[in-house]
Image: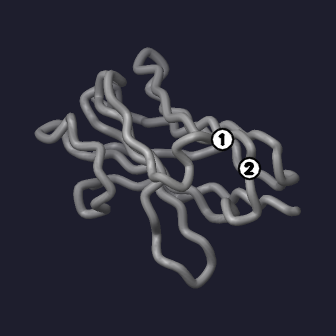
Amino acid sequence: QVQLVESGGGSVQAGDSLRLSCAASSRTFTNYPVGWFRQAPGKERLFVAAITWSGGRTNSADSVKDRFAISRDNAKNTVYLQMNSLKPEDTAVYYCAAGTPSRSDYIGPNRLMYNYWGQGTQVTVSS
């Protein structure tokens, strides 16, 4: 089992930056690919970015590709989402999710490939 805890959300102005963190309880977390998803009120949960177990490859949605960056520090069992040039449309609850060691290189948008989810952290961007 892997327990994930997100932090770093908050209320900011358009153009500001935030860094979200996803901390894991298990040392085997280093074997898991990790993704970030977000869900705005009344909308489905959407893929934002993901990173392989090693951090060697990343993937991100077109809507955030030039503004957000995902990274990980396996020594700290933590994955980060650096969000720059935030826009009001980035407002959502952000969730991190861990995949499975048997697919440690999967970094796609399919939510079903991610087995463990955090409780989410709210990001609100005002204009």
Q: CA distance from mark 1 to mark 2?
A: 7 Å
Q: Amino acid at mark 2?
A: Leu
Residue 105, label in figure:
none
Q: Quadrant of the C terminus?
A: bottom right
Image coordinates for residue 22, horizontal then vertical, percent: 52, 39
Position of 27 with respect to 100 (left or right) is: right
What residue is shown with label 1?
Answer: 83
Mark 1 and 2 residues: CB-CB less than 8 Å, in contact? yes
Q: Nearer the viewer, residue 63 or 34?
A: 63
Tag 2's secondary structure? loop
Residue at x 21%, y 35% (from the top left corner): 105
Tag 1's secondary structure? strand
Position of 12 with respect to 121 (left or right) is: right
Q: Farthest top residue?
A: 75
Does the image show residue 36?
no
In the rendered image, the vertical position of residue 46 relative to residue 28, given as above or below = below
Residue at x 30%, y 38% (from the top left corner): 33
Does the image show residue 68?
yes
Image coordinates for residue 35, horizontal then vertical, percent: 40, 46
Position of 1 with respect to 19 (left or right) is: left
Image coordinates for residue 90, horizontal then vertical, percent: 67, 60
Residue 86, label in figure:
2
Residue at x 53%, y 58% (from the top left corner): 119
In the rendered image, the vertical position of residue 40 relative to residue 18, given as above or below = below
Quadrant of the image occupied by residue 3:
top left
